[in-house]
Image (tube, coloured by chain):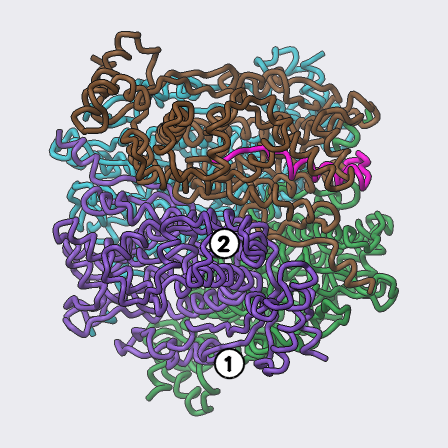
Chain colours: A cyan, B purple, C green, D brown
Amino acid sequence: MAASDRDSQFKLFSDPVHGFISVPKRTLLPLLQSPEVQRLRRIRQLGVGYLVFPGAEHTRFNHALGAMALMQDTLSTLADKGTPINADEREAALVAALLHDIGHGPFSHTLEHTLISDFRHEAMSRALLIDLNERFDGRLSLALQIFDDAYERPFFHDLVASQLDMDRLDYLRRDSFYTGVVEGRVGVDRLLKTMRVTPAEGGPDSRVVVEAKGVYAVENFLISRRLMYWQVYLHKTVLAGDKLLQASFRRARRHYRNRSLNAVEGASPALAFFLSNDLSVEDVRDPEVRAQYVALDDTDVLYTLKRWMGSTDPVLRDLSQRFINRKFLRTTFLDEDPSTEQLSDWKRAIADRLVSEGISTPATAENDAAFYLTLDHSRHSAYERIDSSICILGRDGTVRELSEMADVSSSINSLTGFVEKPYVCAPKFLDIAATVRA
Amino acid sequence: MAASDRDSQFKLFSDPVHGFISVPKRTLLPLLQSPEVQRLRRIRQLGVGYLVFPGAEHTRFNHALGAMALMQDTLSTLADKGTPINADEREAALVAALLHDIGHGPFSHTLEHTLISDFRHEAMSRALLIDLNERFDGRLSLALQIFDDAYERPFFHDLVASQLDMDRLDYLRRDSFYTGVVEGRVGVDRLLKTMRVTPAEGGPDSRVVVEAKGVYAVENFLISRRLMYWQVYLHKTVLAGDKLLQASFRRARRHYRNRSLNAVEGASPALAFFLSNDLSVEDVRDPEVRAQYVALDDTDVLYTLKRWMGSTDPVLRDLSQRFINRKFLRTTFLDEDPSTEQLSDWKRAIADRLVSEGISTPATAENDAAFYLTLDHSRHSAYERIDSSICILGRDGTVRELSEMADVSSSINSLTGFVEKPYVCAPKFLDIAATVRA
Amino acid sequence: MAASDRDSQFKLFSDPVHGFISVPKRTLLPLLQSPEVQRLRRIRQLGVGYLVFPGAEHTRFNHALGAMALMQDTLSTLADKGTPINADEREAALVAALLHDIGHGPFSHTLEHTLISDFRHEAMSRALLIDLNERFDGRLSLALQIFDDAYERPFFHDLVASQLDMDRLDYLRRDSFYTGVVEGRVGVDRLLKTMRVTPAEGGPDSRVVVEAKGVYAVENFLISRRLMYWQVYLHKTVLAGDKLLQASFRRARRHYRNRSLNAVEGASPALAFFLSNDLSVEDVRDPEVRAQYVALDDTDVLYTLKRWMGSTDPVLRDLSQRFINRKFLRTTFLDEDPSTEQLSDWKRAIADRLVSEGISTPATAENDAAFYLTLDHSRHSAYERIDSSICILGRDGTVRELSEMADVSSSINSLTGFVEKPYVCAPKFLDIAATVRA
Amino acid sequence: MAASDRDSQFKLFSDPVHGFISVPKRTLLPLLQSPEVQRLRRIRQLGVGYLVFPGAEHTRFNHALGAMALMQDTLSTLADKGTPINADEREAALVAALLHDIGHGPFSHTLEHTLISDFRHEAMSRALLIDLNERFDGRLSLALQIFDDAYERPFFHDLVASQLDMDRLDYLRRDSFYTGVVEGRVGVDRLLKTMRVTPAEGGPDSRVVVEAKGVYAVENFLISRRLMYWQVYLHKTVLAGDKLLQASFRRARRHYRNRSLNAVEGASPALAFFLSNDLSVEDVRDPEVRAQYVALDDTDVLYTLKRWMGSTDPVLRDLSQRFINRKFLRTTFLDEDPSTEQLSDWKRAIADRLVSEGISTPATAENDAAFYLTLDHSRHSAYERIDSSICILGRDGTVRELSEMADVSSSINSLTGFVEKPYVCAPKFLDIAATVRA
């Protein structure tokens, strides 16, 4: 019957952030039901963030759905403003939004370079998109073109990958919601409603711009973004959790290399695959690598760490227990990189402690200490390109970079520029802040 | 220039309930800027409700804008589901939603019958819509047809006036938001997303139905509605405020009739017009009546009461002071109507008190007491037609009344039926509850 | 130093539902850091609910923290109203709220009877509380008394286990928040602010009551609770997920009993322990059982199902794949229990299908079909005791059951009573609804 | 009876921002019911802001209640951290928070200097506080001391008047809520939970500080504050509304001075009092001035403008009609002050237009034009003292200014400093932006 036929055009999902989300039953719903997308249900959006913000258990699945929902709203706004969008383009844009992050690995960014060197999740996303396209008989080809910025109307790519793409708009709003960091909230609907494509007639040159009345919405967005970086994404304890997880896996990989495999017994098959092979980003071409990758999610990591809590290697055992029971190392931000002597002193102190705690022997302690001391740099990488990319359509019809707008320039100045800061993760008994001050 | 031309298709309004609202610059924005619609900024949505829920200062302007915004969303949903809606229909539907309540008077429902007997705000809304249509050169004719249910596609009327119309959906959500009665919150987007028109091909018979998957959303809506009635619209103190305001105006009207005009000195010109003429709903045809009506808003009422706080009539003075300084009478709900003797006893006790307080003389006291004692009945009128009007489209394509759905019938049963309850408003010293119990 | 000493009295957690939560560093924080409580981070509050409501990934850890926060607010309200609460009692009440659910197993309620027969999570919570009390040198003894309702001030127990306890108030609010079912939202602060203890002087008889002005808040709470039951906890697809998970584990247990262990290879050690032993609730006394239980969480279940996706048993393989890739059976609610013949017919049809899909052989099909067909009854168990337990303190000082209050009785009537409904979970090809109708 | 006695210790108010607010029935509730506080129900918090943000109808009453509620929470937090606060101090602090803004006039800040020269609302607040204290038999004396910063524990004054006082915390949160500018939302509970008094033992030197872990909360607060300034408080159209309202009253005052009183007929008595007398801030000592001031609220202003829409003075008539029907002038921000010639040119163009529209005669036009052209400067005054006033308690026990904290300094730098910008309000036909650019 006609009515019930149409009844089934959409499936509704209830989302606490965007309300009801309508997923078209054509192409989109089958994609959503694919193992590749269902797997995102088992990958936390914020990696170890849930160990710092207890409400932030949300997953990449939820985020993918949200990015698709924002794409629907944005396309409607653009259509209302006179940019024609046909049914194929619409479907392709939704597909691209839904799948944009499909290549993320367990704990999102934390482990990516530990598992595959030079990893870029975009490369994996693209490879998986091609696999899906084959299974979907080429119906994702246009989405793939948009993803690759190879489609003749480049504004679609802007909506999928740019400073103001659906990905960023959804994750900032969502992460603010789930962490309870209310000031990070972005007025997403304001931003969407002030976007347009210009010049609509311009063909290859067409791109997404923000109307003059949306300048404050953009500024708010950048400020919210900065807030979220410093208070969530680069939160000291989040960084400490990242480093601990990475240290556990670096330690485990050594056992695979040394063939001391009894120490890493119990690792999930997919994790064992990545730890026992030295893979680089080139290897995403190998179907076996992709199959193993799709089998891998947060469950593997947590299960494996729980098994390693009983490892025969006291260091791996200790690192795993620390992670599972949330006994992290401490992060200390520094004004400048510590000297080599300083680092050696710290490492020696850690080594002594490891011996006294019975974790290391005097012979191994120095070597083991390296897993308990990390020097790294927090980077607010999102800032670097601000000046080059958000464009504003003035009331007089001209298009200018955001930072060239008279009204906002003073505020924007404080948001641009690349911020980088050294930090050290080390056991708490080492009072890094005090030693640096002294 | 083309771009900036399109830039001006919409004006954005920031609304705390629905986010950004886009008002089309064609027809809608000029209408919004008309004195008739701007006047709604000076009429509180909940009448005296703000004196009980301090956050509930929201106005009919805000609500009209919200109803228009929900209409936009609903039309987009219906179009997505295959119901074609052309540009003229779209504009007309938005106009009808924006103007549906334009005939409301000061303090919304409280004073309507005090100012014009047999008043129905729909009659005034229609009359003002016709005036506007003239000034807008007939551009509102289709909206008027929809309003009158005279348009050939009746589902548009359903969206403007039915159990699930945009008016109800906006005001329940909005009143819950502003009063802080969080349980009254309605998941409006769920409801909208499950609406459709059926049969789309059916021409005159087409109407709005809810898809089977929306049954719970409808049930939630009805439950929220009931909650809001008992906890907000029929709140004891809200009723007490209503009765006090009505009593003040009944008293004033008597002075106009008695020509004891010094007692009502200072009334605003528009209020004086309505109090000194005995008008009925027929008189909305008179352009002078409409002009005076449009000049009338909450400001007139509050200003006038402030003036009457210094009236030469001690009763009018006392009633006005009580309202402005919020010394209301007390509402008591009863199981049944009090007897005539009971009412006489109460009135006598009030008369005695008025004398002892120096407000009345023994000669006038009995008469004056009538302004301090009201017997009325709270009616939850919304329930009566529930069984006759919300239709559900089953998964098998059949359309049935909500109450016939197996899944919900037991819950719905408790929501249907007309609830009516007597209540008395009287000074607090009369402990009505105690005397009734005794 | 004094200042920084005090600085460390609380650790703050950011919660999207309650805002900032202050955890006292004395007793509470060390408890929070215990493996038993950290484990709750790996147990989803709503079991399989996240597979239906994609935002509902929240865990029991988050909920335990929230219940503790509500306890803090409630104790402050009660103290403000003149009920003295000393520091020991305060700490004990917070401990009891934090640990009230510590005995929950993976996927909350879904698997409890599959893993341990006659399981009651309260029994396990109590056993774990005793273990913790030992490790905390008896500092949890008072909390244990409160938990057991053995403390001389019984109102503390009411706050931990009653119709209006902190558990229910937090989970309803939280589940509404994360599922996006906005109408289920409870105005928790209203409820808390109208609670009091009466008679304060009454010693052993003292209990928690709600003041008359809180009656509507209670009614709202019960309505919200009902809404959440029908729309979340007993959602068709949630029940379908439950049944599929249980079927997988029943199937696996059979292999442990039959010693066909190659089929269940790869199960996590803790799960293997519970599947290979036939344990009953008595066995929670065994420390080994408790140790294995504490090692068990959602991770074990998901990891194990992922392994079983490659099982040598085609039925276990199919059930696991269905769960991980979310190909659930379909739930159909019925008006009455189906007849034995009906069930046999369905089972036969399933058996045929299993054979044709190559999952079963003709010899095993009938037997295997039992894992694809379940008849059960949804029970809204929360209703049964409503009439017996929420007490209202009238304005005249008398205490009455909620259902005896004149104002609310008609609404409450529709909320009381025990609702039970048969339902069947079966493969979608069997159109149960149609066959029952026919 | 004891129980119902205690039942009446608090009256609850439902607030959409803070939830349920408990007002103590002792002292606070009678104060709330005083005409001075009830009058705040008729004064919009954001002045003309509701004409730009249609949801922002909230009043000073609502805000005063909110500031009191935040004071309750803050005092509880401070007490929990070991700062003893006795019942008298608690009550006085609540009174001070409730009454802190009682001296505000109609439309909040817009008209204050038009009605009374050199007006400071603090002076009026103080005078009214003294009046109330007399009527309350001296029970507000301690509150008055706190208000005057004359109490021996100065941290109470900090909570009433400082960079982080209850006033600011409530209004930012509340204005963000009602305007829908979501990014301006402040995590108030975070801030409150990290406040403390130090040194508790220090007597006269004790002050409010924020703990180190609250630094980000403070930074968020300052960023939110800046956002709200630029996007709400100094919004172009808000400034345009302010200037129009001021111009109407400047025009009316001229008629009072010129004794051309027929032009201003119908003004409310209280407004007429202020327009016909030249009062300065000294005159708040006069009880008659205070009585008239208390009689004055938004109602007077709107009523009077509605009357002036029919004034015999075409300029007053036009200005009033523009305000009531929201036909504002246009605000243009400039990089620098326009030259005297430029201003003369603009004024001449306006004069010509007034003549051609029949509003002015050639003789009066130049003079009248002054009411249609304003040059002013927006000042973000809140920034100037930032560096001098928010103190952070470090983890090492030392107290430092916010801007001296290493972690935040770079961000804070961009927030400090006084921002001032010239702007012109003029009729739209004068395209100020274009003429300046040219």
- Label 1: chain letter: C
Q: Quadrant of the C terminus of chain C?
A: bottom left
Q: Amino acid at mark 1?
A: Lys
Residue nearest the viewer, comparing B143 with A30: B143
> Is A123 inside the magenta-drawn segment?
no
**In the foreground, D384 or A368:** D384
Q: Can residue C10 be seen at all in this image of the molecule?
A: no
Q: In the figure, residue C102 lies in which quadrant?
A: bottom right
Residue B258 position, x and y percent, is 44, 63
User: Residue, x 64% and y 32% (percent of image)?
Assistant: D287
Mark 1 and mark 2: span between their CA atoms? Answer: 68 Å
Judged by depth in the image, the label closer to the viewer, 1 or 2, is 2
Q: Which residue is mark 1?
A: C421
- Residue A384, given in percent of the width and then of the height, sits at 39, 21
Task: Verify whether residue D103 appears in magenta.
Answer: yes
Magenta residues, start to end: D79-106
Q: Residue at x 62, y 78 (%)?
A: B344
Chain containing mark 2: B
Asked if residue B126 lies left or right of residue B254, the reply is: left
Figure quadrant of the N terminus of chain C: top right
| Percent of width and height locating residue C331 | 43, 74
| Mark 1 crowd level (few <14, some 14–19, many ≥20, 10 Å Cα) | some
- CA neighbours of label 2 inside 10 A, class few (<14), some (14 to 19), many (20+): some
- Residue beneath label 2, please? B263
